[in-house]
Amino acid sequence: MEFRILGPLEVVENGASLPLGGPRQRALLTLLLLRANEPVSTERLIDELWGAEAPSSGPTAVQNQIARLRKVLGPDRVQTRQSGYAIRVEQGELDLDRFVLLVTSAETAAAEQRSALLTEADGLWRGTALTGLPDAPFVAPESARLEALRLAAVEDRIDADLELGRHADLIAELSSLAARYPLQERLRGQLMLALYRSGRQAEALDVYRETRRLLADELGLEPSQSLRDLERAILAQDPVLDPPPRQAKRAIAAPAAVTAPAHAQPAPAKASDKGNDKAASSKVKVYDFSGDTIEGDLIRPEGTTVDARDFAKHASLIRIRTNFIPEIIKSAEDL
């Protein structure tokens, strides 16, 4: 059996979609799938399904909907747990679980495989999450949460493609995404970088000016420091922005079995003494906003110290010999 919520709700068994009943029953199933294998109390089900309009017979109404679900899915799928219910979902049966596993697997993969894994993850989506459900209290916030996860995965895949030198291929996609999410600075920065690397410096700067105007008009804000740093680097034609050698796309199979930690955050890097070599070449680890890390070589003249949080101001002293996207730099420490 396959459960799909990354788009309209659908349950498929032996290649055929199962009839899932009316809107309230579909909403109940979706709510249970969002917390698959975890008990959801009857009280919470009532609140999430009806909100302030909950009927006085709420517990009975939930029991009736559960009974109908069991007729469709089988008696052992929806289990009574403590003071509520849980739906039993096996590994790989829920599209959301597969999406999260692919995204987690991509976090530690090399750029080419990371791009392939994240492309596969995005391919699981069949439209906007949770479409076709009634206006239950949980639908809008959960749909927004899932869409944010999807957008973050798309941005991570674009980072990988930029690292692989595919900037020219990304411009049309990034232009569309930037129009759809006009205040998403990470997308705007990626578009600026793709344009600049494609020899379109003036257009990259136009994107910055448009972003600055939108942020001022809509939010009364200036662009982030990282986006301003990127604009300055483009104006200076800083070599740190130069594209890496282009690598052609090719299909890469996902790992046969992956044990993924539950959204583990990377531990902070610890500084260590590298000596006082005049060449001053050492490894650097850069953390981006998504939690990914990029490693490369840091070069600095003897006796020079650099605060990576103010990276762009020292661009003449630092060159990271790997892909570097200034708009997502958060911190860096010598290893």
Image (spheres, grey):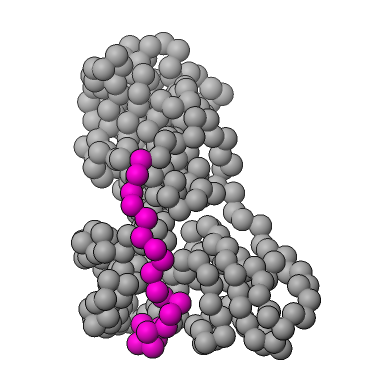
Q: Residue at x 57, y 63 (%)?
A: 295
Number of numbered discs overlaid on the protein picture: 0
Residue 319 position, x and y percent, is 53, 77
Horizontal arrangement in the rendering, residue 93 relative to residue 209 (left or right) = right
Q: Position of residue 55 (x, y in %)?
A: 33, 32
Residue shown at the point (66%, 57%) measured from the top left: 267
Picture quadrant where residue 70 is located:
top left
The vertical placement of 53 against 17, above or below, is below
Q: Quadrant of residue 309?
A: bottom right
Magenta segment boundaries in residue numbering: 231-251
Point 61% across, 55% down: residue = 266
Q: Is residue 281 magenta?
A: no
Residue occupying image coordinates x 32% and y 72%: 197
What main secondary structure does the magenta stretch of the protein show?
A: loop
Name the residue nearer the viewer: 234 or 94. Answer: 234
- In the image, taking residue 38 as reference, residue 229 lies left or right, namely left
Tell which of 235 and 8 is nearer to you: 235
